[in-house]
Amino acid sequence: MKVITDVTPLRTSPAFRRLWVGGAVSAIGGQFNSFAAMYAVWHLTGSSLMVGLLGLASGVPLIVIALAGSMFIDSVDRAALARRATFGQLVTSLAMAWAVLEEQVGLLIALTAVAAALGSLAGPARRALTPTVVGRGELAAAYALTSLAFQVSMLVGPGLAALVATAFSLPICFLIDAATFVVALAGLRGLHRPPEDAVADRGLGAAMAGFRFAAKAPVVRGALLCDLGATVLAMPFALFPALSQDRFDGSAQTLAWFTTAVAVGGVTASALSGVITHRARPGLVMITCSMTWGATLMVAGASHLLFVTLGMLALAGAADTWSVTSRTTLVQSATPDRFRGRLSALEQVVGAGGPNLGNFRAGAVGNLIGPGFAMSLGGLTSIIAVAGIVASGKEIRSYTLGADTPSDEPATVTD
C-alpha cells in the first residue's frame, strides 16, 4: 500500500502542476499577510479588541461573499474569475503595505476585509477547477497535495514572516504576499473553463438550486454536516491560552507549542496522505477521522501532562487534515460540474464558518466550566453528533469513488 503523498497529479497534469505551485506559494504569502496584519494592529493599538476585529473583518466577508458568489460562479468562466480575484488580492496587499507604513489601522482592517472577500471568490473558483484538470482517479491525491501545501504554509509561514519583520519591516511582509500572487496568476495561465451551460442560471435562484442540491444529495449533505458537527462542537483553539495557564506554565512558548503541535500533525498527515487517497471509500475515511478528532480532544482536555496534551493535539491535527481531504473529495466527486462552483462556495462557508463558530462556542463554554472540561466535552459531543449523522443514512459510508459519480469534461487549456 502506498503511504507517502501521491504526486501523480503533479506528474501527469501540467495544468494542475501550475495551479498547485501557484496556490502553494500564495498560501505562504497569505501567512505573511496574516502575521503582519495581526502584529501591526497589536503594535499600533495595544488592544486585543482591535486584533479581534481583524478576525471579524476576515470572517464576515468570507462567508457573505462566498454565498453571494454562489449566485453566479457556475455561469462564468471560473478560471477568469480566479484570475481577476487574484489580481485584486495582489493590489490589496500592496495597499496594506502602504497602510502599515502610514500607521492607518482603520484602513488596514478595512483592507483585510477586502482581501477576505476576494479570497472567498478566488478560493472556490480554484477548487472547482481541480476536477477539470485531473482524472477522477487522481482527485483525492490532488486535494491531498493541496492540503499539504496549506499545512506547510501554516507551519513555516509565520516563522518566516517574523524573521522578515524583524530583519526588515512589516510592510515588506505585505510586499512578499503581493509577489506570491504573481506566481498564483502564472499558475492560472492558459486555463479556460467556460460554464457547462451557456445559459446557466444566475442570481438567487442559482444559489438556491445549489443549496437544494446539497440538501438532497445524501453524500454531499452528510459530508458537510459531519464537518460542521466536528468543528462547531469541538474546535479547541480558543481554549489554548486558558488551558496553558491552568494546567501548565502559561508561557507564550507553551501556547505556541499547542498550535505548532496541531500544525505538525497536519503536515505529517498530508505527507502520509497516500494512506487515504488510494482508498475507494472516502466517506469511511472521513467518518473515522472525525471520530478520532473528537476522541483525541477528549484526552487532551483531560490530560495534565504536557507531552500527552501535545501528542493528542498532533493526532487531532492529523485527523482533521485527512478528514478535510476526504470531505473535499466527497463533495467534488459527488457533484455534477454545473454545481461545482456553488458547492465549492458552500464548502468554503462550512470550512470557515464552522471553526469560527466552534471557537466562539469553546470560549463561552470554557469560561463557564473551565478549558480542560470544555475541550473534553466538545470532543465527546462531536463524536455523538457525527455518529448520529452517519446513522441517519448509509450513503456516506457506502459511497465509492468511480461508481455512479457525475461525469465531467476536461477544462480547456491553451498555450
Image (cartoon, rainbow, N blue to C red):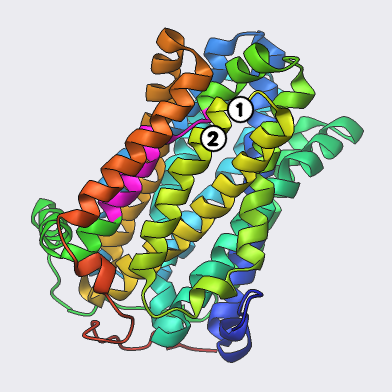
Q: Secondary structure at mark 2?
A: helix
Instruction: Residue lying at the far right in this picture: please name it.
Output: 167
| Kind of residue at badge 2 | Val
User: In this rendering, would 332 be left or right of 27?
Assistant: left
The number of numbered badges drawn on the structure is: 2
Q: Is residue 236 magenta?
A: yes
Q: Quadrant of residue 151?
A: bottom right
Q: Position of residue 100 (x, y in %)?
A: 68, 26
Q: Quadrant of residue 273?
A: bottom right
| Kind of residue at badge 1 | Ser
Front-lying residue, 189 or 228? 228
Cα–Cα span, label 2 and label 1: 6 Å
Q: Is residue 6 visible?
A: yes
Q: Can you identify the residue that label 1 sits on?
A: 303
Q: Position of residue 349 (x, y in %)?
A: 33, 46
Magenta span: helix, strand or loop, mainly?
A: helix
Q: Residue at 71% x, 17% y: name it.
A: 248
Q: Residue at 66% x, 56% y: name it.
A: 267
Q: Are marks 2 and 1 in contact (CB under 8 Å)?
A: yes
Q: Secondary structure at mark 1?
A: loop
Segment tinted magenta in the rendering: 224-237
For label 2, the crowd category at 10 Å Cα-Cα, with few meaning under 14, some 14 to 19 and many 20 or more, is some
Q: Residue at 31% x, 78% y: name it.
A: 194
Q: Is residue 294 magenta?
A: no
For label 1, the crowd category at 10 Å Cα-Cα, with few meaning under 14, some 14 to 19 and many 20 or more, is some
Front-lying residue, 60 or 75? 60
Q: Can you identify the residue that label 2 sits on?
A: 299
